[in-house]
Image: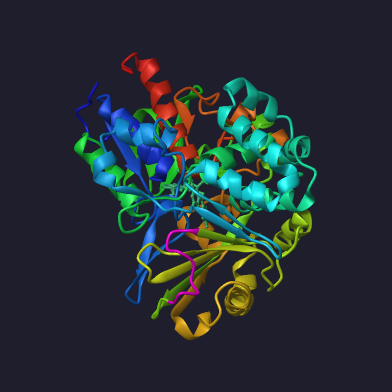
Amino acid sequence: MHGTSNKHYDVIIIGAGIGGLVCGCYLAKAGMKVLIVEQHHKPGGYCTSFKRNGFTFDAAAHSFGSYRKNGNMRRIIEGLDLDSRLEVKRYDPSDIIVSPDYKVTFWADTDRTVQELQHAFPKEAENISNFVTNLINFRPIDFAILRKKTFKELLDQYFQNDQLKAILSIPVLGNGALPPSLISAFTGSKIFTEFILDGGYYTGKCMQTLPDTLTERFKELGGTIKTSCLAKKIEVKNNETKGVVLKDLGYISSKYVVSNSDVRQTFFELLGDGVARREILKKIDAMVPSLSIFTLYLGINDPHESLPDAGTNVWFLPDYNIEKLYFSAKNMTSDIKYFMMRFSPDKKTILAFANAPFRDKGFWRNNKQTIINNFIKKIEDVLVPGLSSRIVYKDAATPYTMYRYTLNYKGAAYGWATFPSQLFTPELRMMTPIKGLFLAGHWTTHTQGIPGVAYLGYDVAKLILKKEKTYRK
Ligand SMILES: Cc1cc2nc3c(=O)[nH]c(=O)nc-3n(C[C@H](O)[C@H](O)[C@H](O)COP(=O)(O)OP(=O)(O)OC[C@H]3O[C@@H](n4cnc5c(N)ncnc54)[C@H](O)[C@@H]3O)c2cc1C
């Protein structure tokens, strides 16, 4: 299958996010000639890290889930023989939720988590046990039923207590960027099983280790990657992909094209006019992206006991009206109401995250510093007394920054908003109506987050290899 020319590949993948890298590795492993092009100067997309003033910060994603034995992420990494090279470590507890009346801890030991929840909410003891047991034992058919429901409807089926429902909803709001009344029960329950009950995994010294190791493996398997290389156009003739036009490098032909970049860019810019059917463009144009995230980066000179355990996500829930909290984030002023913070595994930095809307550069130029200062004050008031005196470096990424580094539409953190109505949109499956064009990443309407996009990348590779009849399980 290997071509001879550097101007022809079997597959060109646009984007070296985790979805693109996993897809590339599995295709190269099967012997295909694969080129990955990435517009940023390093691979990883939302899973990169950067250095400032001697501190290493994860730019966005800061841990992952689904790495239990037989978990999807574990199987994908093992399939590439990377498990020992990656040195994946699980932080325990993975998550703590602090509300005005409760502190709820999510341990690696699910029974312990259930017992603590039951202790806090004794009248809901049996319901808690049923909820967790059913989530863990859900079969694919059960998840199909959950597609049409909201997470609120699912919680209402199990629980009476509104405080408990709010506590179980805050990590879903943070990791899915929608409140329980709007997010699909499918996504909410997947966030629980794949991110919360099996979360807190981390690779090496920083998240960059994950894309760097995948890139290294991709090259070992014969793949070619070009960074600082923007794809400008996907060439299509008679509804079939012919190759990709790259900035500076020009046209390179390929049989297949996989887009790991956002779907709006793929359909409106890369394909250009008159390629995709008008109904598809109309549908994509009407779809709603997920919220973005305002991310605070703090360098600390003096770790102190008031800081949470390194590697644990600590959520602050100020009151139990989750819907109101969501709308406060969506209409962000300079005040942060709820957030999640994490003291890094190297015990030198803090990341703090708040769901936030996309606004233009001017808004952030005028408001970024005020938001940073308010955010620090909020953390200091409610979780880490004396924090400001230990900060030696502070900066933040706005939703605009998220867009600028990854070209994700509106800096969306998780691709499309996962309303039940937007989930599994037929037109945004991995295989598109254009022959040879595939989508891999969080802008397909299937899933999100690192394990989700890793699985999509793997699945797209499987689809292509099946077409080529070279797929070996
Ligand atoms: C602040 C924040 C925190 C998060 N935290 C977590 C977390 O802790 N755990 C978790 O599991 N998930 C987290 N997520 C979500 C998760 O990071 C994403 O869902 C996932 O990484 C998306 O991966 P992807 O492969 O679909 O795309 P991306 O990571 O968006 O990568 C797409 C790549 O395509 C490149 N690209 C785009 N257009 C072009 C072009 N024309 N030419 C060449 N290259 C192009 C981009 O530069 C980018 O590198 C977080 C997201 C954010 C924003």
Task: Using the rendered image of the protein, determine whether residue 180 is visible from the camera's viewpoint.
Answer: no
**Residue 388 in picture, x, y percent from top left:** 52, 83
**Residue 333 in picture, x, y percent from top left:** 71, 70
Task: Using the rendered image of the protein, determine whether residue 360 is visible from the camera's viewpoint.
Answer: yes
Residue at 27% from the left image edge and 39% from the top image edge: 82
Give the residues in magenta. 304-312
**Residue 408 in picture, x, y percent from top left:** 53, 51
Foreground pick, 304 / 363: 304
Quadrant of the frame with the C terminus: top left
- Is residue 308 part of the magenta span, yes or no? yes
Residue 261 in the image: above or below residue 276: below
Quadrant of the frame with the N terminus: top left
Position of 321 with respect to 117 (left or right) is: right
Residue 448 in the image: above or below residue 52: above
Residue at 62% from the left image edge and 79% from the top image edge: 370
Foreground pick, 246 / 24: 24
**Residue 452 in picture, x, y percent from top left:** 49, 38
User: Residue 155 is drawn in which quadrant?
Assistant: top right
Q: Residue furthest bottom?
A: 389
Residue at 25% from the left image edge and 34% from the top image edge: 81
- Is residue 198 part of the magenta span, yes or no? no
